[in-house]
Image: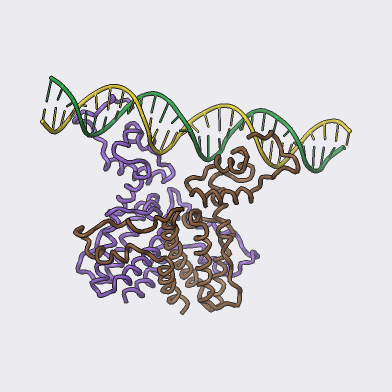
Chain colours: A brown, B purple, C yellow, D green
Amino acid sequence: MTARRGRPPRDADVLSRARILKEALALVDEEGLEAVSMRKLARRLGVDPMSLYNHVDGKDALLDGVAEVLLAAIPSPPPGTGLRETMSALAHGFRAAMLGHPRAAPLVLTRRLASMTALAPVEAVLGPLLAAGYPPDRAVHGLRAVLAFLIGTLMREVDAAPTFSGTGDPGRLADLTGSGLPAVVAAAPYLAVCDHETEFEFGLDILLDALAP
Amino acid sequence: MTARRGRPPRDADVLSRARILKEALALVDEEGLEAVSMRKLARRLGVDPMSLYNHVDGKDALLDGVAEVLLAAIPSPPPGTGLRETMSALAHGFRAAMLGHPRAAPLVLTRRLASMTALAPVEAVLGPLLAAGYPPDRAVHGLRAVLAFLIGTLMREVDAAPTFSGTGDPGRLADLTGSGLPAVVAAAPYLAVCDHETEFEFGLDILLDALAP
DNA sequence: CTCCTTGAATCTACGCCGTAGATAATTCAC
DNA sequence: GTGAATTATCTACGGCGTAGATTCAAGGAG
């Protein structure tokens, strides 16, 4: 930009992968996923767009990096905890991590992640299950069922999250009386509102009841 | 393109919303979501890019349209069917519709859809639940829990689907021995493979057992 | 101290993208 | 026949991701 070319002097503000990921997450939080561009991100960092490529493999790799930052925020429960409590704590930790950055959460929920960071929570679930004597195949089935539910609920929850102003659920269901959908009409009051917290506990309880009774 | 300007003569090949959506779905099937552009789609239709805007509100609306096409392929089970059977049939119908177009499925699974098409399956689930005497709030909770699971499983299933060549699951788990993740290592054989059919039935059974016993 | 390799930041340029706005050609209602 | 509406095309703008060349300081080799 205004800056000179060439390698930066020793004391200059150093660009680094960590700084880039942090700023990228901030950008997503503020303006949403679709607003992310290498150029805009570089502008925020006061740097030439192409400089980013010295620290990150491209836009896709950048977004993978942001996803890992989100995942790293999930705390692993202490080892002594009981089975069901462990699984519940991890589910809630996952949810909290996503709700902390609703606009960025789709990066975790929709991308196939291949990093080690993603395996820490897996270990935290599988460990207690195996220790409790579950056969490994059944443990993996359980893990996958819970994870599927988590991803689905959080996708709903996260894109219903208010971006900045308060336009939430209402208004999405126009008057349907006489639309040939009697059950929808009958349940309309309950369809119109959605307490995500309640829905989350409802589904999670069913699954955990079946898996860790 | 090579064609003349102005309104097309009465007999000419007419561009229409339906033709556009159909070609768009074909394009997604062949090249994936990220390859979709108004220009490329227009090229396939032998038409100027801007012509599309006479039938579709923009790229986003186009993709919403494709999503609706997918949703419309879910059959509603006949009215006489039992409660659990109905819900199971709808879940399997949803899955089949998504697996029929794995690259397009994220359009349904990740976008907030506001169309009437999306309400038909909802009616088909809610109807039997209410008829069976479920209080509407509980019916809605159940619907949402199952839907969350469906979305989560299908997202996994659909982006594991082979794009064209046979590179499936294996190879994603490098050797982790000595990585400090003993449970992951112990369950590795089961983590490495994923029979989506089995996983689907496993989770669905748990949920339906709890909701329609 | 000098020379050279190497790493990081910059600059330029290319080919895409979505779509606003103007223009032309045809049909339809009257 | 005449005007309004419909639809396709053309042009143009600003933004995008990133390949490739260039510049310059830091740090090691002699």
Quadrant location, the C terminus of chain B: bottom left
Answer whether residue A115 is visible to the viewer in this image. yes
Q: Residue at x 58, y 71 (%)?
A: A77
In the rendered view, tell whether residue B149 sits above or below residue A211: above
- Quadrant of the image occupied by residue A197: bottom left
- Quadrant of the image occupied by residue A48: top right
B7 on left or right of B153 = left
Q: Residue at x 41, y 74 (%)?
A: A206
- Residue B62 position, x and y percent, is 34, 44
- Residue A182 position, x and y percent, is 22, 64
The number of discs equals: 0
In the rendered view, tell whether residue A111 sits above or below residue A206: above
Quadrant location, the N terminus of chain B: top left
- Residue B64 position, x and y percent, is 34, 48
A174 on left or right of B38 = left
- Residue A40 position, x and y percent, is 55, 41
A125 on left or right of B10 = right
In the rendered view, tell whether residue C9 sits above or below residue B198: above
Answer whether residue B156 is visible to the viewer in this image. no
Q: Residue at x 46, y 53 (%)?
A: A164
- Quadrant of the image occupied by residue B40: top left
